[in-house]
Amino acid sequence: MSTRPEILFPLFSELETLPGVGPKTVKSFEALHVTRPRDLVFTLPHTGIDRRKRATVQGADLPGVVTVEVTVGQHRAPSGRGRPYRIEVEDAQGAFQLVFFHARDDYLRRILPTGARRVVSGKVELFDGVAQMVHPDHVLEPGDAGEIPDFEPVYPLTAGITQRVMAKAVAGVLSRVPELAEWIDPAQKARAGWPDFHAAVEAAHHPVDMAGISATAPARERLAYDEFMAHQLTLALARSSLRRSKGRVSRGDGHLRAKVLEALPYRPTSAQTRAVEDIAADMGAQTRMSRLLQGDVGSGKTLVALLALLVAVEAGGQGVMMAPTEILARQHLAALRPLAQSAGVVLELLTGRDKGSARVAKLAALARGDVHILVGTHAVFQKDVKFADLRLAIVDEQHRFGVTQRMELGRKGAGADVLVMTATPIPRSLALAQYGDMDVSILDEKPPGRLPIKTVLVNMDRMDEVVERLRQAIRDGRQAYWICPLVDESEAVDLSSAEERFKRLRAALGEAHVGLVHGQMPHDEKDTAMARFEAGETAVLVATTVIEVGVDVPNASIMVIERAEHFGLAQLHQLRGRVGRGTAASTCLLMYQGPLSEGGTKRLETMRETEDGFRIAEVDLQMRGAGDVIGTAQSGVPRFRVGDMESQASLMAVAQSDARRLLAEDPGLEGPRGQAARVLLWLMEQDQAIRLISVG
């Protein structure tokens, strides 16, 4: 089934086919990410209004919406421009006023004639002790009062779309929603008490009270599950297509790994040992490995990566390790080369800077198999980069890298295994959404001898004290990072703030002691500044955030982050992780400009309270939502309309095991439930998955 099933056609027609939707409204709907009728099926009310009829306004919870039958009294036209038009009305127990601004006299006299009975519904507030309903939402004759629902759903709106337009369009869509065969596992559906798809859509759009709007209402939960299920099916299909493509069996005898472990001044943690065992077992299997190695700052991922690469070399093949930036690639090289040399393994670096004959020579050595391990930036993706026998590809800092790039890298070597590493601890729900196609190893212990980092909050007013402390630390032979704020989106402003701070610190601490690194510098200047800092020639490195990931200078034990309230939690955690890598006690100073916003306070206090990256990631997720935490656009995590990854993590986990089980039982999605699942994939626009089935 490689074309959209006919039963879904009405949901994928033009928006203009819906009642009350013209070309202008179509433009307005785009702001709500609504481009076709199916999008409205999953655009649910976010709150509701109780419009049950009352006998009187007396005793109602004000300000609040009241629906009441009244007798219309006298009209009082405005006494001057901009003054309101008032109509006295009386309910069963007392009088109140209907108030209109800029209203036409003749219109009001027509719909609210004195002496008539009317049902009015709208927000009532007290002004100087008098109850007033300003611009009622509904004014009806008592016989028509049934048109007002007891509970009225309220939809998210945008400029050009009113509740009325929305309600009319949604009613049009609901009349088109077909009865579809069931794709959810029957036992799961019964256990959760979920309705069928059609009934769930109806109930979610017609809640009878506030409980029907909550994420745990059965109808809503079912629709959230449908979204998660489609997403997890896509990931499971990607995973099984990877598994079907024959892997290379790479078994090492351990002789190179033993040499490296011997050369180490410490023993690996049990988490590191476990991760290496998992990876080696995956590499020795017939199917292709697809594993995520997740480790907090400083948990020793680099060693695990090297040992994994050595399995490939022991098996007679090659390995490649890819970093997102050149600074990081060079750093991996510096960290890995001495260890590789202890095992007699040839390690080379390839970046965009390699040009001309030097590059040609490197590529020739790689193609001959003389280079065992290649470290590089995404320059390793280029067409002319060919390996003699690539067995393992490692991608570092995955969140800049979606499923598509993972597949791309896998194609470089026929059947090469893929290992992804991230230093960004990811909450479980996000890991499931983003890496549901992968197996996960977690490094949750720090190598021996790592001391805790003391984190202090300091007001910017105390700048002079901070500089004085730095001067003292420099005398004691210590080194420090000074991170300048991201003032705004423009690089130029960030730059001037960094250069300004650099000048002032040089004036205070002495010219020779202070270096500067920022994103606009030419590569070689950046490298020189970093090298001087690493060699201890400069004591303070002023930087914009180019150093947030992976930079490793063991002697640096002070991290100053200026205007820390401007940084996100994940970034603060990464930056702090640049110190505390040596034997000295380390400090992180978070300098802020008061007064702090509620979010700013929470971020900085979380940093002060914990060094646990997973705990920090959970707080970050609660505060910002999934899309922002991982930059949804490039991360391959979909925007769910109904499902909420933060609060429904367990639902995502159920969807993952259900999707994997369904594919294990019915790999081609040919059976009745498999066919229903195909319709779900079309409904949820999982085109990538559909391609995988039609190919598979």
Image: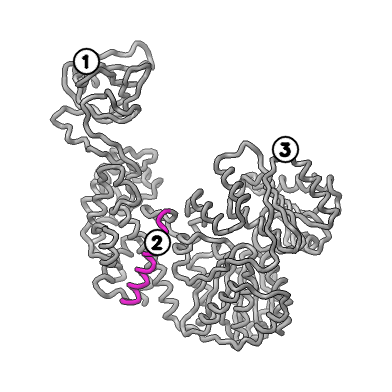
Residue wearing tag 1: 73
Q: The residue under label 3 is which amino acid type?
A: Asp
Which quadrant does the C terminus fall into?
bottom left
Label 1 or label 2, whichever lies nearer to me, is 2
Mark found first going from the N terminus, 2 or 3? 3
Residue wearing tag 2: 652
Q: Which residues are magenta?
A: 647-666
Asked if residue 656 lies in the magenta stretch, the reply is yes
Please state the horizontal and vertical placement of residue 94, each as a whole percent of the image: 24, 18
Asked if residue 321 is positioned above or below residue 201 in the image, the reply reads below
Q: CA distance from mark 3 to mark 1?
A: 64 Å
Please state the horizontal and vertical placement of residue 656, each as a whole percent of the image: 39, 67
Mark found first going from the N terminus, 3 or 1? 1
Do the residues under discs 2 and 3 have CB atoms within 8 angstroms?
A: no
Image quadrant of residue 164? top left
**Magenta: main secondary structure:** helix
Asked if residue 92 is positioned above or below residue 550 in the image, the reply reads above
Image quadrant of residue 533? bottom right
Residue wearing tag 3: 461
